[in-house]
Image (tube, grey):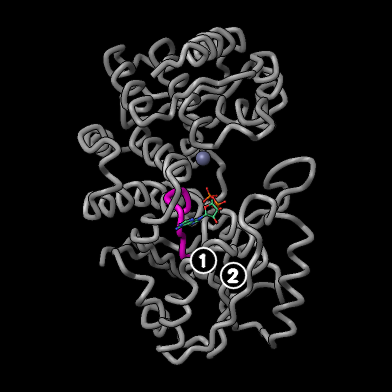
Amino acid sequence: MREIELPLPGRDLSYRLVIEPGLRHRLGPLLSPFRFPPQVVVISDRRVARLYSAEVLGSLTAAGLTPVLLTTPPGERAKAWGVVPRLARELLARGTHRRTPVIALGGGVVGDLAGFLASIFMRGLPFIQVPTTLLAMVDAAIGGKTAINLPEGKNLLGTFHQPRMVVIDPEFLRTLPRAERLNGLAEVLKAGFIRDRDLLARLDAAGAGVFGDEAELTDTIYRAAAIKAQVVSQDERESDFRRILNFGHTLGHGLEQASRFRLPHGRAVAWGMVAALTLSERLAGLAPAEAEWGRRLICGFDLCRPLPELNPEAVMAALRLDKKRQETGVPFVLLPRLGATVIRDGVPLDLVAAVLGKILGEGARGFS
Ligand code: ADP
Ligand code: ZN
């Protein structure tokens, strides 16, 4: 079992991220050092629960715990305000008290929702992350951000609530649909681009075969998770350093918004990274051959399919409205070389528009 230790911000304590195939069968013993009271709450979506709740609850029960399973519908719509009081009242009905741990078993949606609930219920319950999507394993489950959506936008209500432990079992990915794998892969690529060129080289060698090779997959998740862990532990609240995690996301968010969130996050971020590589060539001195290698790597994973009906004006409008916009232009995370970052706060809008036009053109021709 491999581990990453993360500091708890502002306190002289830490928590562990552990990773190994099969860990879902060992959740009970992993939790025993915490000496939680017998009742534990597992929150999952119905799809994940159908696949994995028997194994996970079985492991908890075998360790002498009394798990209670609460489920939500799968998908983003579970991150809604109305779901929070419903779950909270179910917790009350089951006799939950301040020391009852909440275990999030699912993707980023379940983690965000369960973490939000755990952070506010009776002013905070202990929280455990058991991510089941690649995106959650390498990104969403690490860093302590929780959130739900409002009709006006995503993640508008949220808190910071660090988990007591993050338990990663790569075997969960055996059942993950291909489109969801690609969403996570975009974040793995992002981790490589900002901090680990060697991870990129390994992804290049493995190609899509990475999902068929459990040892390689485990190592890939470990390395990407370690990068996220390293960044967030230096800067919990995104004042500056954490912004490097936005690589590919500036334009990515614009594309998502312009598509009214029909474009999957991974494909939006992939195109955002393709654009950021081109901007890095122009503004940060990235060698053209490296930028081209990076773009081919991203698109080799089938992340660069065309962007039908995406109106460049709508994308630019979303960028102008972004809360992180500065007077002088758009902030971008750029790469002076692959594996290193520099933040440019004032990338001129007309330059962004030109690169966007190129991408939408290439996308329209089925660039890959
Ligand atoms: P993300 O982690 O990208 O935020 P979600 O939490 O919305 O995504 O999960 C995406 C979809 O994948 C949901 O429909 C969820 O039920 C499903 N899912 C999550 N984990 C697994 C898994 N291990 N196997 C199969 N389906 C899964
Ligand atoms: Zn992302």
Q: Position of residue 85 (x, y in %)?
A: 78, 68
Q: Residue at x 42, y 15 (%)?
A: 367
Q: Is residue 134 left or right of residue 262?
A: left
Q: Is residue 10 visible?
A: no
What's the residue at 62%, 26% (across, down)? 254
Q: x, y (%) of residue 109?
A: 59, 54
Instruction: Residue type at mark 2: give it.
Output: Ile
Q: Is 308 above or below relative to 224?
A: above
Q: Are marks 2 and 1 in contact (CB under 8 Å)?
A: yes
- For the N terminus, the image quarter is bottom left
Amino acid type assigned to the residue bearing label 1 in the image: Leu
Q: Which residues are magenta?
A: 130-136
Residue 182 location, x and y as percent? 43, 39
* Residue 83 sits in quarter: bottom right
Asked whether residue 131 is in view, the answer is: yes
For the residue pair 211 and 84, the one nearer the viewer reads as 211
Where residue 314 sits, quadrant-wise, is top right
Q: In the rendered image, which residue does mark 1 sit on?
A: 105
Residue occupied by mark 2: 43
Q: Name the quadrant of the C terminus.
A: top left
Up the image or down, 68 lies above or below 107; here it is: below
* Residue 187 shown left or right of residue 73 in the figure: left
**Residue at 74% across, 84% down:** 93
